[in-house]
Amino acid sequence: MKRVVNFAPGPAALPLVALEEAQRELLDYQGLGMSIMEMSHRGKDYDAVHNEALSLLRELLGISSDYEVLFLQGGASQQFAVVPMNLLPGGKSADYIVTGTWGEKAVAEANFLGKTRVAATTLQGKKYVRVAAQRELDLDPNAAYVHMTSNNTIFGTQFHTFPETGNVPLIVDMSSDIAWRPIDVSKFGLIYAGAQKNLGPTGITVVIVRKDLVAQGRADIPRIFQYRTHAKENSLYNTIPTFSVYLMRNVLRWLKNRGGLTAVERDNREKAKRLYGVIDANPKLFITDIEKESRSVMNVVFTLPTESIEQKFIAEAKARDLVNLKGHRILGGIRVSLYNAISVEDTQKLVDFMQTFARENA
Amino acid sequence: MKRVVNFAPGPAALPLVALEEAQRELLDYQGLGMSIMEMSHRGKDYDAVHNEALSLLRELLGISSDYEVLFLQGGASQQFAVVPMNLLPGGKSADYIVTGTWGEKAVAEANFLGKTRVAATTLQGKKYVRVAAQRELDLDPNAAYVHMTSNNTIFGTQFHTFPETGNVPLIVDMSSDIAWRPIDVSKFGLIYAGAQKNLGPTGITVVIVRKDLVAQGRADIPRIFQYRTHAKENSLYNTIPTFSVYLMRNVLRWLKNRGGLTAVERDNREKAKRLYGVIDANPKLFITDIEKESRSVMNVVFTLPTESIEQKFIAEAKARDLVNLKGHRILGGIRVSLYNAISVEDTQKLVDFMQTFARENA
């Protein structure tokens, strides 16, 4: 069996131990003679997995009983619509802080459903090279909510502090940086995240939502889209992708065994420090115009001087089993995704290669 | 490794060969050093799997180029809302043929979105013991569409012929009987099905929709819910549950290798014949009031004279590794689900047990 170092932006690398456990019991879960994915989502065996995943998430992120934790389908892209369907009543407006492509898409979907305002955008020309500062936010004190994207996978920027929004609920798409470090959940009205970067495989969207917002949510939309439906049914209103929850459970166990999010944050900061270190040491070769305070710990984006040297970089990295380094099609260049499953040692292999590459291509 | 005969109603048994293939390459797909679920849904390796699954489905079901085949998220329950969101414009009404719980849920969701009519219901007291005949349909010739559920998993009834709806598009929830036999897709406007019964694991909803209906669909709803969005993007508008598609691909390959849907139908009819045979031979022990013409080939539902003898039945079956026979919580009793992955031999094991049980409990 071969395993490479996989810097994919998502769907992304999973911890080997989580996959190995899944492989061992794929045909026969716990001696029951069937796969976890071949049994009822309402039976006690799957239920134990489901509730363990919910509990682990509550424990790791420190989520209080003021919040519901929901496992939904459809990805963050579906939440772009479901958030305003639930929480943007007629007569109200919602504020959007736009710092990248996903924020643009979120506001575009909300515009089908109600009134929105762009409270800030950091678009410069065709690019976003930074996130937004508190001072530049034009917030409506009567907004239904303020929406933002905490980490921009495509542009490689990230909010390192969250804006103050007063009494207006802050709603954050944390798809690409949930659980990269501990957070104070009580500052948020709603957090959502596709699981396929830091938490597990594709198929599950985690929604953490304050109970009073669930209660306030519109009741005149189809039941499948009402948060209260899924809250009431413990995320088992309809058939959930059970295998995705099971794998997420395995990943959450692994996060806990690593020492929880404090240990995870330490490693994530170390990984980013080493990678930005080699970039900053070779600024003519590894080029980035992202403002330093906005640099993402999760997605490190840069270009090389020419497309041919970028191709050489990618090919030589691949020869060392360092793969999936190609940038997003919007930007080109290089993108290194350093989600939780990438270790400090894996990152160091890339850093070593980049140092060698810099010496050879000075 | 232990494997039982798993008559679960869905999520349901998968063909062993499909799971074994997944297990073999779970950590290292095709020598690439990563799992299929750890790579981009836009890369060429996943893309080959995705397109193979789409092609196999087209080939097995004989789907012409007049139709789009979409892989969506959210299950059939989400389609209960998404169908009217797309295809029920203001000023129009939609007809619903209600023959079970899922049909009730479908019309309830549609009622949030527009005007509906119940064109027929076969509810008698608290139960449905048959599907609807053509003569009892009260169809609106100006309806936007006619919606129906082809197989009722809970009540064990199934349409063996489809209604004629003239020029009004027929939309069918085939979640629990898609691909049980060949069908003439050209008779339908739209077919949808959660994959987790006859096609694969949870996580994917297959939508087969006539291209003119896609084009007519409303464009003033969020993009994520417009069929045209997913048609245009080959079902890769957002991150799809890649592992679910991969497993479905494995199941579709297995269906093809069995001889396609003609062979599958022959086996399915044989399974149902044997099981209904032992039921009809012991009518005082295995009790069913479902009308014979409406009996489902997929879900065989019956009761025993008392709850204690039902429990004995379930326990003795389990001792022979014949499991997941308990009826739905609405009805109680016994439900045997005979989806495509259940072989004639597996079914015969249950039939043998039922004959023995009948002798011993006469």
Image (cartoon, coloured by chain):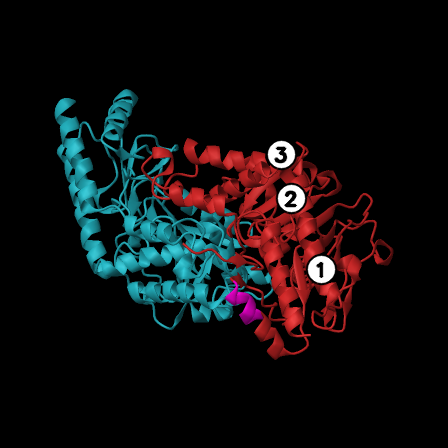
Chain colours: A red, B cyan
Q: Amino acid at mark 2?
A: Val
**B308 is higher (above) or lower (below) than A334:** above
Res A276 label: 1
Front residue of this view, candidates A1 and B357: A1
Is there CB contact under 8 Å for labels 3 and 1?
A: no
Res A239 label: none
Mark 3 → mark 1, Cα distance in angstroms: 31 Å
**B354 is higher (above) or lower (below) than A91:** above
The C terminus of chain B, quarter of image: top left
Front residue of this view, candidates A137 and B136: A137
> Which image quadrant is residue A130 in?
bottom right
Q: Residues within 10 Å of mark 3 (few under 14, many from 20)?
A: some
Q: Which residue is mark 2?
A: A264
The chain letter under disc 1 is A
**A339 is higher (above) or lower (below) than A330:** above
Mark 2 → mark 3, Cα distance in angstroms: 14 Å
Judge if badges 3 and 1 mark residues of a common chain.
Answer: yes
Is there CB contact under 8 Å for labels 2 and 3?
A: no
Expressed as whole percent of the image width and height from the top left, the position of residue A35 reads 36, 42
Query: Magenta residues, as a range?
Result: A314-320
Helix, strand, or loop for circle 2?
Answer: helix
Q: Which residue is mark 3?
A: A59
What residue lies at 75% left-to-right and 41% top-to-bottom?
A187
Please report whichever mark, 2 or 3, sits nearer to the chain's N-terminal start: 3
The chain letter under disc 2 is A
Q: Depth-wise, is mark 2 or mark 3 nearer the camera?
A: 2
Q: Amino acid at mark 1?
A: Tyr
Mark 2 → mark 1, Cα distance in angstroms: 18 Å
